[in-house]
Structures are given as C-alpha cells and as structure tokens.
Image (spheres, rainbow, N blue to C red):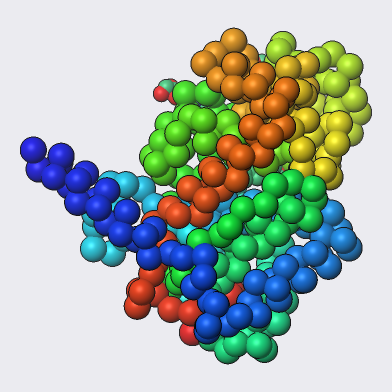
Amino acid sequence: MASYLSVLVLLCLAAAASAQLSPTFYSTSCPRALATIRNAVTAAVAQEPRMGASLLRLHFHDCFVQASLTLSLLPNFDYGCDASVLLNDTATFKGEQGSLGNIGSIRGFGVIDNIKAAVEAVCPQTVSCADILAVAARDSVVALGGPSWTVPLGRRDSTTASLTQADSDLPPPNFDLANLTAAFAVKGLSRTDMVALSGAHTIGQAQCLNFRDRIYNETNINGAFASLRRGSCPRPTGSGDTNLAPLDTTTGTLFDNVYYSNLLSQKGLLHSDQVLFNGGATDSLVRTYATNPTRFNSDFAAAMIKMGNISPLTGTQGQIRRACSRVN
Ligand code: HEM
Ligand SMILES: *[C@@H]1O[C@H](CO)[C@@H](O)[C@H](O)[C@H]1NC(C)=O
Ligand SMILES: *[C@@H]1O[C@H](CO)[C@@H](O)[C@H](O)[C@H]1NC(C)=O
Ligand SMILES: *[C@@H]1O[C@H](CO)[C@@H](O)[C@H](O)[C@H]1NC(C)=O
C-alpha cells in the first residue's frame, strides 16, 4: 500500500515537474537564447560533424544520471537533466566525467562552454546549462539532417554530481535487450523509446575497446563488416583500444534511419546495437524504422522530449550556473 502511494505521489511530482517546463520559458527573459545556441551549434558542427554526435550524447548522459524513480523519493535526491555531467571534480565530489561510460569518451565540453559564454553575454545568469544541453542536442540533430522538435525549457542546474550513479545508470555496450529495456524503464522510457533513441547511433563514433568482443567473437555479424572493423581494431586488449569507427558504417555523419538498415544486415557496431535486431521483441520495430524514415523521425523526436523531461530541477530548485563546469 505504502509503495503504491509512493508511486502515485511520485507520478504526480514527475508530472508537475515536467508541466513546469515550457517552450516559451525564455521568450521574455532571453528572447535571443535559442538563436544564440543554434548559431553556435551550427558553426561547431560545420567545423567538425562529429561534434553534433558528441553534443547529443552529452544530453543523454546528463538526463540518465541521478533520476531513478526510487531514489527520487529521498530528500537529497539529485536530478536527471540538470547539467550534472558538465561539472568538474571538486574537493567535495567526484564528477561524472570520470565514470566508466564517460572517461576518455564523452566530449563537447569546450563547445558548451563557448555557447554558455555567448548566452551569458546576451542574458547574464538567465539560461541554464541543462537547457543549453537540451537545445544543443536538438540543434545538432537538425544540423546533421535529422528531425526537429520543440524543446520544453525551464530546467535548472544542479549543485552536485554523482560519479557512482553515472557508473550504475549509464548503459554499457555489452548489455542485452532485457538489460537495455530495464535500464530505460527505470527512467520512465518505453521499449519503443529505447529503440528510437538508439537511432542516435546513426551519427558519431565508438572506440575499438567498446566493439572488440563483437567483431572477434560474435556470430550475428556480417563477415565483410567484421573484417573491415578488425583492420583498425587489433585483437589484443590494450592495442588500438581508442581507435575510432563510425557507429553507422554507411552514412556516419548524416542523421538518418540507415542505422536500422545496418542492423537488418547485421552491421550494428556495438553489441547493444545488434541486440535490437537479433530475433527478439524489437525486431519488428527495427524493420519499421528501417523502411519508414518518417515514423523514425517522429518517434525519435517524441522520445527525445520524454528523455529531456526526466526529473528536471525547476522553479527555485538548483541554480543557473554562470559557468557550466562549476557551481556558482
Ligand atoms: C541504448 C543504450 C546505449 C548504449 C549501450 C550506448 C553506448 C554507447 C557507446 C559505447 C558509445 C561509444 C563510446 C566510445 O567508444 O567512446 C556511444 C556513442 C554514442 N552514443 Fe550511445 N549508447 C546508448 C544509447 C544512446 C542514446 C539514447 C543516445 C542519444 C539519444 C546515444 C548517443 C550516442 C552518440 C551520438 C554517440 C557518438 C558520440 C561521439 O561520437 O562523440 N546513445 N554510445
Ligand atoms: C573544468 O575542467 C576543464 C578540463 O580540465 C578545464 O578546461 C576547465 O577550465 C575547468 N573549469 C573550471 C571552472 O575550472
Ligand atoms: C543482464 O540481465 C541479466 C538478467 O537480469 C543478468 O543476468 C546479466 O548479468 C545482465 N547483463 C549485464 C551485462 O549486466
Ligand atoms: C572472445 O572470447 C574468448 C573466449 O571466451 C575470450 O577469451 C576473449 O577474450 C574474447 N574476446 C576477444 C576480443 O577475442
């Protein structure tokens, strides 16, 4: 009974929190915010297409940490899309950049710092780093040819970060379908959301250490594709660990639905990619997205909005950081 009640209270709180976000949040306080972010993202992606992927992933890794439904009942709970990922280590906490899924991998901090500086120049201490991440993720997808959507705004920034929660909540690439489904369900995201959001791997790159086991040991992989990837990812652990390969082997810098066609031909780069099309419950959705780009685009956009609504700080919670890498 108590737990049903908690869940109910929680759902109300979650609904209240996301209801406070609004696309017009900065219309009067900072009318130039969105254009300032968009211009900076467009320039950064034009200079280096991969940056669009890196900025999209930053938002994902921000939202997925510190938002477990159970933990959110605790008084000192820290939140989801709260820019905690951007905080450097301090004397009082170790930040999330050193976590298993982030270290040596997550990038784009310099671009976010530049965007923040540009936004601070037009509206001092008004626009949160968490909102900048959400808008930059959308603008990155658009800059690489993907769908657009309206971003709900009004998130505030955390005053802390959690290395241990980043370690436990960011899904690793050796996850199977059930593990992935569970990791997304904990965040209130459905299996459809999970499959659609995985389509983010239509852009960006991964390091050899994250797909070595797959290209040497797995059997549900296209032979020519496996040999191609082995060419720059030597078998012994430790050699070539950081060598990069495109997550989408066909159109790696275009945000399209080709990621799913690759899965149909067993050319998913990560184990966690190919499990989405491996004889299980998500096969039919992968087929749908592979043949219906419009459906993928709309499901991806809807799932991004859901992900961006994961337990934000709102109202007077948290703060608006002046610099994204440290608390005020
Ligand atoms: C389904 C579970 C997921 C797993 C297991 C996963 C895992 C990974 C791994 C291992 C990499 C490569 C990191 C490296 O080698 O340095 C990666 C890259 C990336 N991920 Fe995911 N990911 C998942 C979901 C997502 C979601 C939901 C998004 C965004 C909506 C996303 C966006 C990206 C992007 C864009 C890159 C490339 C980043 C770059 O090139 O800088 N991923 N992911
Ligand atoms: C955070 O760390 C980065 C990388 O080490 C550094 O460039 C940046 O200046 C740091 N930010 C602050 C506010 O110290
Ligand atoms: C995935 O989930 C299964 C069943 O819950 C578990 O036994 C397995 O260890 C998990 N795999 C990983 C990589 O965590
Ligand atoms: C492949 O599987 C073998 C046997 O289980 C294991 O020893 C090896 O570390 C795995 N990975 C690679 C890259 O060969």
Q: Residue at x 77, y 43 (%)?
A: 255
Q: Is residue 32 left or right of residue 317?
A: right
Residue 57 relative to residue 53: left or right? left
Please give the count of numbered marks on the rendered protein: 0
Look at the image and tell me whether residue 164 can be seen.
no
Q: Give the percent coordinates (x, y) of residue 206.
A: 75, 41
Can residue 33 be seen from the camera position used here?
yes
Taking the spot 77% from the left edge, 24% from the top edge, the residue there is: 262
| x and y percentages locating residue 68 in the rendered image | 36, 48
Where 216 falls versus 293 (above or below)? above
Image quadrant in which the N terminus is located: top left
Residue 312 position within the rendered picture, expressed as x and y whole percent measured from the top left: 41, 61
Of 294 and 253, the residue lying toward us: 294
Classify residue 313 by image quadrant.
bottom left
Residue drawn at (63%, 77%), measured in percent from left and top? 33
- Residue 155, given in percent of the width and then of the height, sits at 46, 68
